[in-house]
């Protein structure tokens, strides 16, 4: 447990330690959010394109369970994109990390590991077929110089399959945004405690929002967000449950 605490230390806890070997500035949090946005965007665009081109948009075809499953993956990736974009924005513009705040390299690498696996966990069931579709599409462009397999784009048709998703997807999205809004609020409160980067490192007690209920509401909100992913997935995907399990164990330990 003591060894794990050494890896988990960051910010003000790390500052109190005399052992700062193998650490990086805490502002490096932004690195894996940049990677997360890039990777999630790639998966979202390729999966969405695959879903759009796999069959004609007819009322009969969109009732097919496999097709709906693919669009459910697109829906989950879209939620993840909303999450990682906000986290990147907060890292750059909301949090004023102290110049002395450090993060253990293990935690830094864990961030990359998590944000590489998290998005792909949301579309794991269709990753192979999306990959094959993407490779074939690139090959076709290189050989023919065009994208003859891509249908003519209509915005309504591009978005209409989301309307055919079930109540679990929209309930999960509601839970997701409930946690998302509260995490945004809590991060805004935390960011306001240090008005500028040169302010001293004295600890200030945050108040407001879920800080009135628990000591680490931003972590609790993150757990709620990933509960939303599980509900939106329909609860049948093991990879999404594993994602929630890792989030709960990691953030509970960090809290």
Image: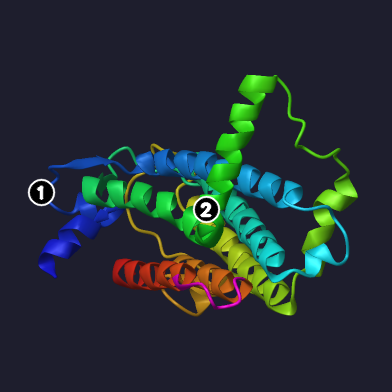
- Residue 236: image quadrant is bottom right
Indicate left or right for 3 with 31 as reference. Answer: left
Q: In what quadrant of the picture does the C terminus appear?
A: bottom left
Q: Residue at x 59, y 71 (%)?
A: 233
Instruction: Please say if 164 is above or below 126.
Output: below
- Percent across and percent down for residue 75 are 67, 60
Instruction: Give the magenta range.
Output: 233-238
Q: Dot 1 surroundings within 10 Å: few (below 14), some, or many (20 or more)?
A: few
Indicate left or right for 147 with 233 as reference. Answer: right
Q: Secondary structure at mark 2?
A: helix
Way the structure is coloured:
rainbow
Per the image, the residue denoted by label 1 is 19
Q: Residue at x 87, y 46 (%)?
A: 155
Per the image, the residue denoted by label 2 is 127
Q: What secondary structure do most residues of the magenta stretch adopt?
A: loop
- Asked if residue 254 lies in the magenta stretch, the reply is no
Instruction: Please say if 221 is above or below 73.
Output: below
* Residue 225: image tag: none
Instruction: Please say if 157 is above or below 58.
Output: above
Q: Residue at x 69, y 21 (%)?
A: 144
Instruction: Please say if 208 is above or below 137.
Output: below
Q: Nearer the viewer, mark 2 or mark 1?
A: 2
Q: Residue at x 57, y 41 (%)?
A: 42
In-front residue for pair 112/108: 112
Q: CA distance from mark 2 to mark 1?
A: 42 Å
Q: Secondary structure at mark 1?
A: loop
- Percent across and percent down for residue 14 are 22, 52
In-front residue for pair 200/90: 90
- Percent across and percent down for residue 47 are 63, 49
| Of pointers 2 and 1, the one earlier in the residue sequence | 1
- Percent across and percent down for residue 178 are 64, 71
Q: Is residue 49 visible?
A: yes
């Amino acid at each position: 447990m003591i060894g794990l605490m050494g890896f988990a230390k960051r910010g003000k806890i790390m500052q109190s330690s005399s052992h700062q070997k193998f650490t990086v500035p805490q502002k490096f949090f932004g690195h894996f959010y940049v990677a997360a946005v890039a990777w999630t965007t790639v998966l979202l665009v390729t999966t969405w394109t695959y879903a759009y081109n796999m069959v004609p948009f007819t009322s009969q075809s969109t009732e097919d369970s496999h097709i709906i499953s693919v669009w459910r993956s697109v829906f989950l990736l879209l939620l993840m994109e909303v999450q990682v974009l906000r986290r990147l924005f907060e890292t750059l513009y909301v949090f004023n990390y102290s110049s002395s705040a450090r993060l253990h390299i293990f935690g830094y690498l864990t961030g990359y590991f998590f944000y590489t696996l998290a998005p792909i966990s949301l579309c794991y069931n269709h990753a192979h077929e999306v990959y094959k579709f993407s490779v074939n599409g690139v090959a076709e462009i290189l050989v023919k110089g065009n994208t003859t397999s891509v249908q003519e784009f209509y915005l309504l048709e591009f978005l209409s399959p989301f309307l055919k998703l079930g109540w679990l997807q929209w309930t999960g999205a509601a839970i997701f945004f409930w946690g998302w809004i509260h995490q945004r609020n809590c991060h805004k409160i935390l960011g306001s405690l240090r008005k500028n980067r040169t302010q001293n490192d004295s600890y200030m007690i945050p108040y407001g929002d879920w800080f009135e209920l628990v000591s680490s509401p931003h972590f609790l909100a993150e757990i709620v967000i990933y509960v939303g992913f599980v509900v939106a997935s329909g609860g049948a995907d093991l990879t999404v449950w594993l994602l929630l399990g890792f989030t709960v164990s990691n953030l509970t330990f960090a809290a």
